[in-house]
Image (spheres, rainbow, N blue to C red):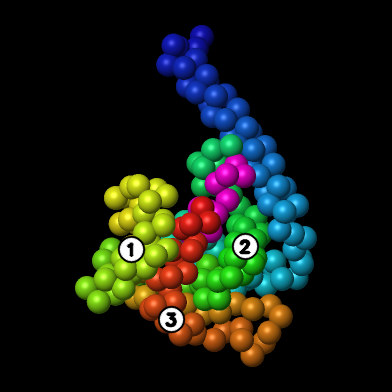
Amino acid sequence: MNSEYDRYESFLAKQLESLSMLNDVACKEGIDTVCKLFGPFDPEELAYFDMRLSDSDHTPINSFQGEMVFSLFYKYFQDPQILKSIDSSDFVKLVLAARTILETSGLVMLPYIVSAKVIRLSTKKSLNRKELVKIQSSELYKKVKNKYKSDKIDKHILTIIATILSSDFEIIDFGDPELDGQRIEVIPELVGEEVLMYVDLI
């Protein structure tokens, strides 16, 4: 005879299984929408990015890069938490779609950063005074600040910029062997402006 605890465990297992199935369906629907809007994607390019992005644990999803990519696509999924269980092949589709979005929005450096191989990630939360003054004097900064009206968002923007400036990235480019593998020479002024443009797109 099953104890109350056994029955409770069984109930929880069924609930978790149902939730997992619902998340899988919602995730597939979200990815299908992204593919329709920004695809189709070349299977060879997807495989190449998957291989180049993968680390020793065979997962291409870097925490910083993942957040940068996911933020552009939350609106296509029923719940942002769904993206936490996305598999590597679908993540690569989002990476390529993110690069497309940023390129078509006129950005020139950030598309390569969000789709890059992260060689060294140095998470920083602040900029030096000179960089901070330059960012805060930007008209786009004022626009974004007025749009979100959130100190938390302000701090997050500065964290993204500071992290990019202190990290190392390597270009992944399936179609250009000469460009593929090159280190990205980060230009602080351009990164600051493009991160603000990126946040304005979200």
Outermost residue, left side: 129
As shown in the figure, which amino acid type bears the numbered disc 2?
A: Ile
Residue at 67% across / 49% down in the picture? 31
Q: Which mark is residue 182?
A: none
Q: What is the crowding at mark 3: few (fewer than 14 residues within 10 Å), some, or many (at least 20)? A: some
Q: Is residue 71 magenta?
A: yes
Outermost residue, front side: 139
Residue at 22% across / 73% down in the picture? 129
Query: Which residue bears the numbered disc 1?
Result: 158
As shown in the figure, which amino acid type bears the numbered disc 1?
A: Leu
As shown in the figure, which amino acid type bears the numbered disc 3?
A: Val
**64 left or right of 19 in image:** left
* Earlier sequence position, callout 3 versus callout 1: 1
- Image coordinates of residue 188 in percent, x first then y, are 38, 78
Quadrant assignment, res 77: top right
Q: CA distance from mark 1 to mark 2?
A: 22 Å
